[in-house]
Image (tube, rainbow, N blue to C red):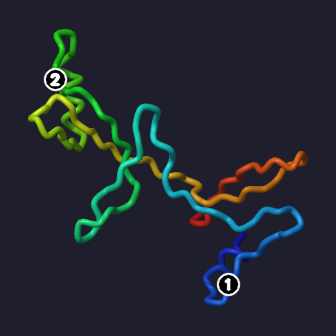
Amino acid sequence: MTKLISAMKEPEFSWPICHEVDAGKPGQETYEDCPSGTTVGYSQGDNGWTGEPDQCIKTVNICRSPGQRASDANQRSLMIRRSFGDRGDRCVEQIATPRPRRTDPYFLDIPNDQGVKQRFWFNLNH
């Protein structure tokens, strides 16, 4: 691995591909999947352009119901909020939380004995 990482720093480097096993080129996915009940959101980039897919967005009703605890409302106030609704409906908001980064963001899809591709994750930064 040390030789490979050193070779990757060279300008003429080309990733070695093993055609015999149909592994293909490596891929990269910087972020983990968002938790269930949330969707991927994008931070705002420079000049108002869409930035990275680095947020998990959950749409919630923030109006306190009779049974809601004060600690629930306090916890929500620690997160980034974006209100929406063109009729003054301030009970519905989108709450953005940071999307977790993968510890091993690179992968290879390698076929197993049955020919089904399995994903193997690794990290080149160690």
Query: Under tag 1, what secondary structure?
Result: loop
What residue is shown with label 2? 63
Q: Is residue 29 above or below residue 69?
A: below
Figure quadrant of residue 58: top left
Q: Residue furthest top?
A: 67
What residue is shown with label 1? 13
Q: Is residue 18 above or below residue 105?
A: below
Q: Is residue 49 above or below residue 60?
A: below
Q: Please, what is the three-letter code of the amino acid marked with disc 1?
A: Phe
Residue at 21% in and 10% down: 67
Sequence order check: which comes first, mark 2 or mark 1? Answer: 1
Q: Please, what is the three-letter code of the amino acid marked with disc 2?
A: Cys
Left or right of 78: which side holds 12?
right
- Residue 6 coordinates in the image, percent (x, y): 66, 80
- Residue 48 coordinates in the image, percent (x, y): 23, 66
Instruction: Quadrant for the N terminus, please.
Output: bottom right
| Residue nearer the viewer, 93 or 101 | 93
Left or right of 18: which side holds 13?
left
